[in-house]
Image (spheres, rainbow, N blue to C red):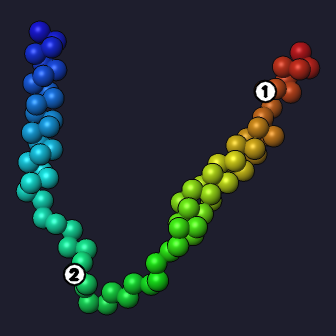
Amino acid sequence: MDKKNALRAGALASGTTLMMLLMSSPALALTRDDGDDPGPGLSVAQTLGLYVAIPLALFAVISGLVILTDKSRKQQKQG
């Protein structure tokens, strides 16, 4: 009985997704709106720095601060 329910749920989810994709209109990204003033594009290095390097650096800094200010290790060593 569980297999039948799983198949039904999968068919419903995929059908709903397919219908939403078919019924949605395109994003019209090529059509400019009034007031659009796009700037110059980013290079590969700028894109990688902005979306990869900076988040990784922020993660490392936050993780380091959490590790440095962790009090549970100090309490375990004393006891």
Residue 48: percent from left, percent from top: 56, 62
Instruction: Give the structural element (helix, strand or loop) at label 1.
Output: helix
- The residue under label 1 is 72
Figure quadrant of the C terminus:
top right
Lower position in the chain sequence, tag 2 or tag 1 = 2
Q: CA distance from mark 2 to mark 1?
A: 57 Å
Front position among marks 2 and 1: 2
Asked if 76 appears above or below 22 in the picture, the reply is: above
Asked if 35 appears above or below 50 in the picture, the reply is: below
Determine the residue positioned at 76% across, 38% down.
67
Q: Amino acid at mark 2?
A: Thr
Judged left or right of residue 36, residue 14 is left
Determine the residue positioned at 38% across, 88% down.
37
Q: Nearer the viewer, residue 45 or 1?
A: 45
- The residue under label 2 is 31
Residue 26: percent from left, percent from top: 16, 66
Residue contact between numbered discs 2 and 1, judged by CB atoms under 8 Å: no
Q: Amino acid at mark 1?
A: Ser
Judged left or right of residue 34, residue 73 is right
Judged left or right of residue 53, residue 2 is left
Q: Nearer the viewer, residue 19 or 40?
A: 40
Determine the residue positioned at 16% across, 12% down.
2
